[in-house]
Image: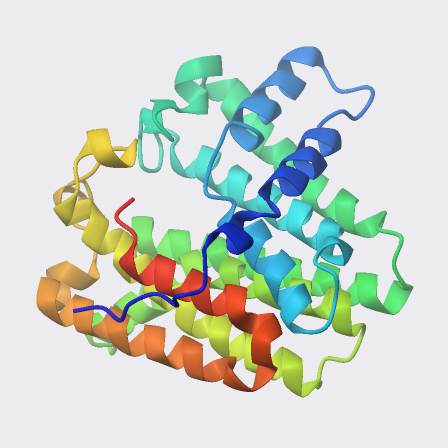
Amino acid sequence: MTSRPSRAPSSAVFAPIPAIEKLLDRSTRARGTPPALAGAVRYALVGGGKRLRPLLAWHCSRAAGGTGRDAAPALVAVEYIHAFSLVHDDLPAIDNDDLRRGRPTLHIHAGEAMAVLAGDAMLNQAFVVLARAPRPPALVTLLLEELAGATSAMIAGQVYDTLGGLPASLSPVHRLRLIHRNKTGALLRAACRMGALCAIGPKPRDPRLAAITRYADAVGLMFQIVDDLIDVQQSVEHTGKRTHKDSGKGKLTYPGVLGVEASQREVERLHKRALAAVRKLGPRAEPLRVLAGLLATRTR
């Protein structure tokens, strides 16, 4: 059985979402973009979603002593990368999904060519947002390096997950961890670290950043294990996306390797690790504790 979420109200956790949505909406209104491309980007970026990565960036800024809003460039950039990855993952050549967030995927909605190009545009725009951020050059450099490294890791994880090539010497569990820490965990980690850096400044050895990194590593792996569990336990009507698909494609999943009960115990262990990581950050880290609980018990 998974640990219960923090008793603090979750309303405070989701309070930044209206501000986040405004920032994302504003970022899509660049001049000179072909209207069809701009529409495709907006369909993918502004069309709903949990906004988990922007929320993590915001609350990690707060936990590190910032305002949350000071992480605006980071949270917009991270969400662009996330949206790009979903659009490309859904393509026929990769996961061939036709449903995302309860509506047609972008290549179904706008055509495969436009989906490819919209993904390319969002990948590029993420780094434009950071490069133009009104922040000290040393901080901008750190943010660019953080996001570039996470994006490369995410792509590597997708290669391992979709095309294989994992080291033969690794056990199935270690293969899973390698896939998940890259494919899903790397971008969640970057969201947390970038949010914290926006508050701390260019101080990569700050103990607050170290604590938030430990939290991010635990939450990142936990998130994907829960995703694996959702795929085998929930329906398409509940989740708004296709389920029961990973095993059919021969993909490594935690329930497939460890079973459902052992996977749930692993979620419990990682949840406790996440809470322990931010214990010393005090009340400002309470939204991170609440988020960890919600992510451990989510069903979609």
| Left or right: 74 in relation to 135 | left
Q: Is residue 167 above or below residue 128?
A: below
The residue depicted at 49 percent of the width and 32 percent of the height is: 48
- Please tell me whether residue 59 is drawn above or below residue 72 in the rendered image: below
Residue plotted at (56% across, 59% down): 56
In the image, residue 121 lies at what x, y percent? Answer: 65, 32
> How far from the left and from the top, in percent, is residue 83?
53, 38
Whether residue 57 is visible: yes
Residue 103, by quadrant, is top left
Q: Quadrant of residue 204?
A: bottom right
Of residue 249 and residue 141, the one placed in the foreground of this image is 141
Image coordinates of residue 252 in percent, x first then y, are 21, 58
The residue sitting at 30% across, 31% down in the picture is 240
Q: Is 148 displayed left or right of 179 in the figure?
A: right
Left-right relation of 254 to 153: left
Which corner quadrant holds the C terminus?
top left
Question: Residue 25, relative to residue 296: is it above or below?
Answer: above
Relative placement, left or right, of 297 versus 44 is left
- Number of on-image labels: 0
Residue 238 vertical placement versus 53 (above, below): above
Residue in the picture at 31% in, 65% down: 166
The location of residue 60, given as percent across then percent down, is 61, 66
Residue 260 image-quadrant placement: bottom left
In the picture, the quarter occupied by the N terminus is: bottom left
Q: Is residue 168 visible?
A: no
Here the colouring is rainbow
